[in-house]
Image (cartoon, coloured by chain):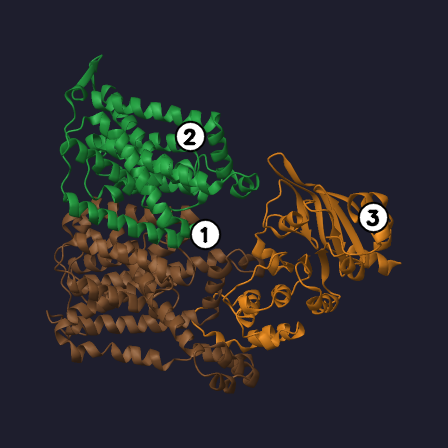
Chain colours: A green, B orange, C brown
Amino acid sequence: MLSVLGMLFDGVAYGMLLFLMSVGLSVTLGMMNFVNLAHCSFAMLGGYVAVTLMNDAGWPFFATLPVAFVAAAAASVLLERVFFRRFYRAGELAQCLLTIGIVFVSIAAAAYIYGTDQQPVHLPSYLQGSLHVAGLGFAVYRLVLIGIALAITILLVVTVEATRFGAQVRAAVNNQRMARGLGIDVDTLFAITFALGSGLAGLGGALAIAMLGLDPSFALTYLIYVLIVVSVGGLGSITGSFAAAMLLGVADMAGKYYIPAFGSILIYVVMLAMIMWRPTGLFGRR
Amino acid sequence: MSMAGAAAAATALSTRGVNKRFGSLVVAADVELDLPAGVRYALIGPNGAGKTTLINLITGMLRPDGGRILLGADDITALPPDQRVHRGLVRTYQINSLFPHLSALESVTLAVCERRAVAGTWWRPLTAYRDEVDEAYAILGTLNLAAVSHRPTRELAYGQQRLLEIALALAARPKVLLLDEPAAGVPRDESNELFAAIAGLSRDITVLFIEHDMELVFRFASRIIVMVGGRVLTEGTPAEIAADERVRAVYLGERKRGVGSVR
Amino acid sequence: MSSDTLAIAATNAGPHAVLQAEARWRWSEIAFWLATLLPFVLTPDYLVLASQVAIAALFVLSLDLILGFSGIVSLGHAAYFGFGAYTAGVVSVHGWGEPLSGLAIAGAASGILGYITSFIIARFRHLALIMITLGLGLLLQEAANAASWLTGGFDGLQGIHTWKLFGRIEFDLYGYAAYSYALAVLFIVFLAARRIIHSPFGLALRGIRENGARMPAIGASTDAHIRTIYTIAAVIAGLAGALLAQTTETVSLEALGFQRSADVLVMLILGGTGRLYGGLIGAAVYMVARDQFSGLNPQFWYFWIGLLLIGVVMFLPAGILGGLASLAERVAALLPRKARRASAP
């Protein structure tokens, strides 16, 4: 029983990270149907920015997080301007190829600059260790991680449901042509959403270092998981991404805990089954 | 009298209580149709009345929430779209849905091969199928497209592409032909061939065409169905429809314009 | 063929002439295949590389059939390549190293796998399809890893020994037998692929690629067509994998991996989709370049490949062959007006 709780805790923490890294892709895919396989490169960028600031510049951990967010957002704006916007009507194949190319370049650049080893991360002492409650140890870092992610989730939900900006995003995801017809500047909206989503991915990447590690293959390894979250959760759905991320996080942890040899196989089988059952995702509409 | 009775009994296409809604939007409500064989029907109605949706429901592109669709005496409600085409229920599209890089000849030949169920043979060259190619070429000939049959579809003039739409439909040897605004977007000087093609359709084929062009409607239709808001408002001969106050109010516009195109 | 030449053919000899002209062997094709014999004479030290190129070309050919001609985007095509490789390898490890029968068994096995998965593939489009192809590839790789008693797992399959071809020709380090074998298989399969493309089925595939939604409306069972070509492509990919296993006498997990699926996609896009020869040329360029730069750090290789991919997608979307074709059209357009008018009807 105790190990189940421990597994659930780790699974939820992992799921939160996946959510942060996936929600941006889900919304932008839902809005513009642009298949951005380079999404996790932004997460990786956030991670490397955080690591560089902490290890080389001695910044405190929490200070690196907003910088990771901004750096990833800025990089995404640049890429969107220069490359992505030419491909909004180009079809899935071209988009896949373009973004795969960007992933390859990002991995090579990371390997060149930082080498292929795992990046060491030194958490401040108050984030290390565990909190002991009723005989169970809860890693402090993961508690903080869950807290931050929950706060951001609530912020996202409030923004989307209660602000004008959020209403416009929902309209554009629902029916882009109609939204344009209503006078919503979908292009600018998309650029902002894209930047925010990529920034969140960068933040997720920075938070992930202490739990998942960081090396140049991060952009590809976690791309698979992010794609699973997005396609199972449904395009353009924050709730869907959250649900799918939790599901995947816990399922993956369960696999690692109880059937390590077959864990990944189970994940892929479940993913395939879900996509075949609901091709547009649990909460998707397209 | 008995002959008339027998003729009336040969219903080519009918629908029974066909319903469809998208959320709270009702696009088809209790649609009952009976099209006797060989008759030319026009389906008219304001934009958004559900005319194209009805064709999508009849051909199987959309699944109805309720109701049945019968081709002749057979219930085809559960059949997939391609099977309905093989039974003789064929449609054309309001906006050209063609194969841009295939030539006109290749497109029609493909349709002929599909009809003859040889499109799955991958071990014999296409050039061995002379009959299919000849038939495709002949169909294109009847529509005056033989001279451009070798050109890729995207290089054809818009009027020619509309004719190719009809050629594709004819290649399937339809018993019931549903034409969705065949004259849509065709400039006046190119529409003669189109009109001639429609007039030239064999009397064996039952034709239902959606049109906004009243000239076409009154020229070719022997009966008119009026749809509004997903429902059939009324049905009758052109004279009856032209005189119907409700239809006038909903659709035909001012009386002093007489018979003209309503766009 | 230019529109003008087609016009002459059509008006002079009717519709059949045009279609026959399309299907006829061009001199450039004959020249291409003759050129594939050059490595024996010009670069006999590089026959091993040549055999690798032929194997890659066969693999790309199979992807072209589903992607270039039918429009199915697959990020997991290496599944069938790897499955064929492991089948041939396992058969050999268990005592039967005869190459041709091993090849046939591997092709058949991949074909069965392709047939089974084709039922899933045919039902989906867009992102769902991409995810499913990706998922199937990853699943198979994990399964191969887990079944290490059969596949050797992470360390790869050990103990493959390929017997002499026809009982006479030995596979040696110089690659003579390897290249002859691979090239012969490539050519025979190419002939079959060319036949498929110029058959009514090939026309149907192009119809699916051009306008999949219209196909049911002309009576086509799109699902059945897709299942057929997907199975055929799986067989061909399996043959390529088997060739790799037999000529290199090794198989490892990366034969099934995403990297391989991505590589074959790059080769096809580089050469140009939907032209059969595009894939072959793309494979040749890619493999030769990789060999040339093999001394480099792998990081650098993926940097340049990434850049190449971006460049091709942005500036040369129809690949090398497509670019050459439009270049040829532009040159033809520059011909003096008199010469062009003389050839028009």
**Mark 2 residue crowding within 10 angstroms, few (<14) / some (14–19) / many (20+):** some
Asked whether the residues under marks 1 and 2 belong to the same chain, the reply is yes
Q: Which mark is residue A89?
A: 1
Quickly name the residue at label 2: A239
Question: x, y (%) of residue B121?
Answer: 46, 68
Label 1's element? loop
**Mark 2 is on which residue type?**
Thr
Does the rendering let one see residue C83? no
Whether residue C300 is situated above or below residue C15 in the rendered picture: above
Q: Is residue C343 left or right of residue B213?
A: left
**Mark 1 residue crowding within 10 angstroms, few (<14) / some (14–19) / many (20+):** few
Subunit ID for the residue under disc 2:
A
Mark toward the start of the polypeptide (1 vs 2): 1
Give me the residue at 39% from left, 75% from top. Answer: C328
Question: x, y (%) of residue A43?
Answer: 28, 38
Q: Quadrant of residue A27?
A: top left
Subunit ID for the residue under disc 3:
B
**Mark 1 is on which residue type?**
Arg
Question: x, y (%) of residue B35?
Answer: 75, 54
Whether residue A212 is situated above or below residue B61 in the rendered picture: above
Question: x, y (%) of residue C309?
Answer: 30, 57
Quickly name the residue at label 3: B254
Q: Which of the two residues, B122 or C303, is positioned nearer the viewer here?
A: C303
The outermost residue toward the right is B1
**Mark 3 is on which residue type?**
Glu
Q: Quadrant of residue C187?
A: bottom left
Q: Which mark is residue C36?
A: none
Q: Quadrant of residue B260?
A: bottom right
Asked whether the residues under marks 1 and 3 belong to the same chain, the reply is no
